[in-house]
Amino acid sequence: MASQNRTLDIEKQQALLDSALEEISENGLEGASYNRIIERSGLSKGVVYYYFENKESLYMTVLSEAKRQFLSSVGTLKLTARREDFWPVCREYYGKALRFALSNMRIVKVARTLFGPGIDRSQNERIYDSFLELETWMKMVVSRGQKLGALRVDMPLELLMNTVQSLGYTMDSWLFSRIEKGEDVDMEWFIGFAMDMYRRILSPEGAR
């Protein structure tokens, strides 16, 4: 977060945020270098340190901006009141989220440093906590799906959440790697395939 009562002009702020996104997407949150971010931005160390007292405060701003862009473009999944609407609504939202991701791969890479399987959050709890509301929202969606009978209830919520995240991470990794290699992927096919996988694993019918 920028220091109190100090506002960086829009052009310089964007240059700094773009540089930070690039650095973190390439090297992960732990491997990112504050000095490289400053060098990439073209700003002086004095300017950057005046507005951001340390690397953590800059990262908090970067993550906040990434979250803002995602929510501004994609929004949050609307909780449905009917079981028959649950999976169609999820499919529509998943498609919107994927299309945003493919147009904003740097943001995706940054987000994946926070949400990938096995990520140790203990070293930067304050930074990771900035995304807790998204996890809370996801739990609400999963809980609603269970109450509607659209999601299985024979496993603990935490395990179900981990399954959703791991399955999504695996499928998205496959898609992003193909896209980055310049391969053509039929998005409608992929979305349909992904949602079928989710339903087979997560729905009550898949449990039988």
Image (tube, rainbow, N blue to C red):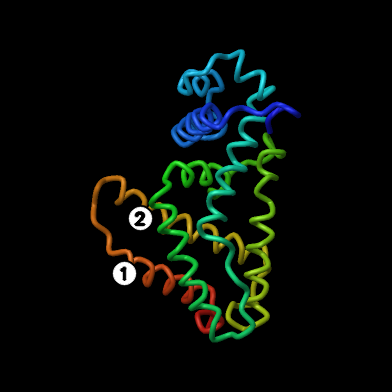
Who is closer to the viewer here, 131 or 4? 4
How many numbered circles does the render carry? Answer: 2
Q: Which residue is mark 1?
A: 189
Element at badge 1?
Answer: helix
Q: Neighbour class for label 2 at 10 Å: few (<14), some, many (≥20)?
A: some
Q: Please, is residue 202 above or below residue 186 in the view? A: below
Who is closer to the viewer here, 71 or 101? 71
In this image, 132 relative to 91: left or right?
Answer: right
Q: Neighbour class for label 1 at 10 Å: few (<14), some, many (≥20)?
A: few
Q: First in sequence: mark 1 or mark 2?
A: 2
**Residue drawn at the location 62% of the way across and 27% of the way down:** 8
**Residue drawn at the location 63% of the way across and 69% of the way down:** 141
Image coordinates of residue 69 in percent, x first then y, are: 54, 49
Q: Please, is residue 66 above or below residue 203 in the view? A: above
Q: Which residue is mark 2?
A: 175
Image coordinates of residue 193 in percent, x first then y, are: 37, 70
Give residue 172's quadrant in the image.
bottom left
**Residue drawn at the location 26% of the way across and 45% of the way down:** 181
Amino acid at the residue labelled 2 = Leu
Amino acid at the residue labelled 1 = Trp
Label disc, if present, on residue 42 of the rendered structure: none
Real-space CA distance between mark 1 and mark 2, rounded to the nearest whole angstrom = 11 Å
Q: Quadrant of the N terminus?
A: top right
Image coordinates of residue 182 in percent, x first then y, are: 24, 48
Element at badge 2?
Answer: helix
Image coordinates of residue 104 in percent, x first then y, are: 43, 47
**Residue drawn at the location 55% of the way across and 79% of the way down:** 86
Tag 1–tag 2 contact (CB < 8 Å): no
